[in-house]
Image (cartoon, rainbow, N blue to C red):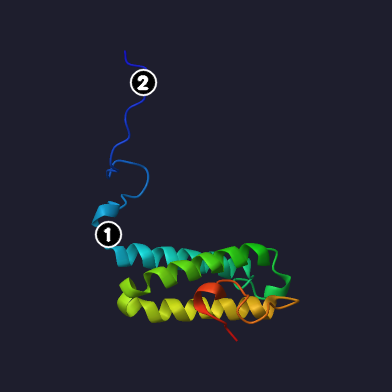
Amino acid sequence: MNDSPAAPGPATSDDTGPNPRDLGDIPSVEVISRAAVVLMSAAAERLGLADPDPDTSPRRDLDEARRLITALAGLVTASVEYLGPHAAPIRDGLQSLQKAFREASAFPDEPGQGPGEKFTGPVY
């Protein structure tokens, strides 16, 4: 009897989880776009934007939001040439998050010093 665990293999329809596509089959623009959406969603949660009153949201954490927005800005700036028609809506989402961060801050950063602004330039 062999006591070693079986080597992991590709997901099949018999597995309990979904059958994810092989990352090698997914176009890079889709991978980048999905990563951007995950960062946007997480930043919005940390800004409290998913709650009826963001000011009293238990999920609001501006330090975490700053990190996520900065990571998103770096990703968008580095990959904008590959995003094609996806670039504009992703940039708009980023800018909206940067503005929401500024509005949520008790002491807003100076223009150009907000999250991700070293990559995008000042957001007003």
In the depicted view, which residue is nearer to us: 43 or 108?
A: 108
In the depicted view, which residue is nearer to us: 32 or 34?
A: 32
Q: Do the residues labelled 2 and 1 touch (CB within 8 Å)?
A: no
Question: Is 3 situated above or below 15?
Answer: above
**Quarter the N terminus occupies:** top left
In the depicted view, which residue is nearer to us: 106 or 118?
A: 118
Q: What residue type is labelled 1?
A: Ile
- Asked if residue 51 lies left or right of residue 38, the reply is right
Q: How far apart are marks 2 and 1 (CA)?
A: 33 Å
Q: Which of marks 2 and 1 is in front?
A: 1
Q: Which residue lies furthest to the top in this view?
A: 1
Q: Tell which circle, 2 or 1, labels the residue nearer the N-terminal end.
A: 2
User: What is the quadrant of residue 90 in the picture?
Assistant: bottom left
Is residue 82 shown to the viewer in this render? yes
Locate residue 15, reporting x and y percent: 33, 41
Q: Which residue lies furthest to the bottom in this view?
A: 124
User: What is the quadrant of residue 9 in the picture?
Assistant: top left
Is residue 60 shown to the viewer in this render? no
To which residue does mark 1 refer?
A: 26
Query: Residue visible at 40% across and 81% down?
Result: 88
Query: Residue visible at 36% across and 25% down?
Result: 5
- Asked if residue 66 lies left or right of residue 85, the reply is right
